[in-house]
Image: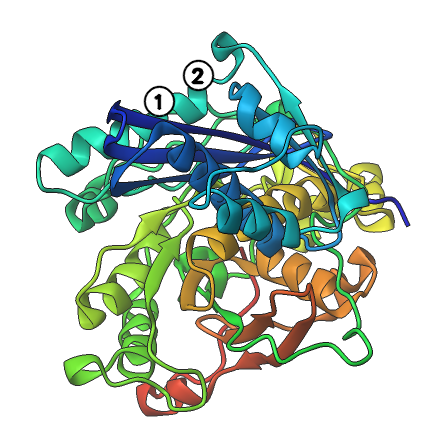
Amino acid sequence: MTVRVLIVEADGASRGNPGAASYGAVVRDGRTGELLAELAEAIGRATNNVAEYRGVIAGLEAARRIDPQARVEVRMDSKLVVEQLSGRWQVKHPSMKPLAQRARELFPPNGVSFAWVPRSQNKHADRLANQALDAASRGEVWRAQVLPAAGEAAHSPRPVSSAAVSSQAASPAASPAASLAPVSRPAVEPRAPAAGSADLGAPTRLLLLRHGPTALTGEKRFSGVGADPELTEQGLAQARAAARRLAGPHGAADPRYGRVDAVITSPLRRARQTALAVAEAAGMEPRVEQGFRELHFGVFEALTFAEARAQYPDELAAFFASTAGAAPGGESVDEVASRAAAARDRALVRFARKTVLIVTHVTPIKTLLCQALGAPLTAVHRMELSAASLSVIDYYDDGVTNVRCVNDTAHLYDTGHLYGTPGG
């Protein structure tokens, strides 16, 4: 099995030495360069060297949460930290020894390397560290924005408001496939528990909620990113039912799954409407994540299966014959699996050991379930996911995944509309 490579870029900042200090760190996919995590924190009064160590520790901890069996390449512009962690220089200062020990114990010696880079090549981590210091000077805590999906422009971290979620126009690219490189494997592969492994504590729990039905859902039409329809009255009722189950009055939650700590949503209108119902009931703000949008069905958009087969018989056959197949102007299942996995990885880093509601669509949920189960992606065509259904996956720090349920619709009994219909 190919070992995944992760790149950690880390830096520390100190205004005075010692003085007000912070760190910044990013994690990237070593093969694609995709940004998987941004981390920054003001750490109070400290030296610049302590801040740099805190940065590399934060980056390595994030990399471990993404894939504890990855090979990690750490890049820093601190010659001292790189040489000490590489074992070429001794760590003499008492305050640095526990930091160096913590950095070394996160990955085995043959699983991590440290390299010095010029400051000009470490600008991202440096910028994050200074943003954290600036936020602290204003009496604020630095918060990361949901990271852009592959191929999208990066932007400075900033909070996302619920008003923006409910009113912003979702405007996915006309052909997302043009900016997304297909990947033949999931970003994090499921693993069996290691023999004799220690108790790793609480998992990061993802509650994968499919949006409620739209007019296209009821007509069983391909519904990806084309028309971007709203929820029907039935769909709004199902969204409210999900909110009662997952958040409920005064923050009550389904005891089987726990209280929701964060809400992430696809940018498409039907998902945002569903997410907003739960987020408002829980008293929080949903975050928009482009990676969780539905598959772009290209020329099949808004067609029924019969219409697509009559108009594009060869293209439809190719689409179902292989997960690498895409409709003209659309995406393949492989491409959705790649970006959904990257979006998942970002959530696992940002909300480690918390419970996160992700409101998304049929294809992203099915690909995440396949990856968690170790099933081939061709299994996406053999699953039923009703509208507003819930699927739950637990992710542990050692890479073990546990699928708790698939297509749970218990919360829909009180709406009078138990079974949703197929669609995006």
**In the image, residue 166 lies at what x, y percent?**
21, 49
Which mark, by number, is residue 123?
2
Q: Residue 54 lies in what quarter of the image?
A: top left
The amino acid sitting under disc 2 is: Lys
* Residue occupying image coordinates x 83% and y 60%: 376
* Label 2 – label 1 distance at C-alpha: 6 Å
Q: Say if mark 2 contacts mark 1, CB within 8 Å.
A: yes
In the picture, measured across the screen, residue 121 lies left or right of residue 319, that is: left
Which mark, by number, is residue 280?
none
**In the image, residue 128 lies at what x, y percent?**
35, 29
Which residue is most to the right? 1
* Residue occupying image coordinates x 75% and y 57%: 189
Residue 301 vertical position relative to residue 278 in the rendered view, above or below? above
Specify whether residue 294 is in view: no
Residue 172 vertical position relative to residue 411 in the rendered view, above or below? above
Circle 1 — which element?
A: helix
Circle 2 — which element?
A: helix
In the picture, measured across the screen, residue 304 lies left or right of residue 244, that is: right
Disc 1 crowd, CA 10 A, few/some/many (<14, 14-19, 20+): some
Specify whether residue 357 is in view: yes
Residue 324 vertical position relative to residue 406 in the rendered view, above or below? above
Which mark, by number, is residue 127?
1
Q: Of residues 326 and 286, which is closer to you in this image? A: 286
Q: Of residues 218 and 269, which is closer to you in this image? A: 269
The amino acid sitting under disc 1 is: Arg
* Residue occupying image coordinates x 8% and y 35%: 138
Q: Of residues 395 and 369, which is closer to you in this image? A: 395
Q: Coloured how?
A: rainbow
**In the image, residue 102 lies at what x, y percent?**
56, 52
In the picture, measured across the screen, residue 288 lies left or right of residue 44, that is: right
**In the image, residue 421 lies at what x, y percent?**
53, 70
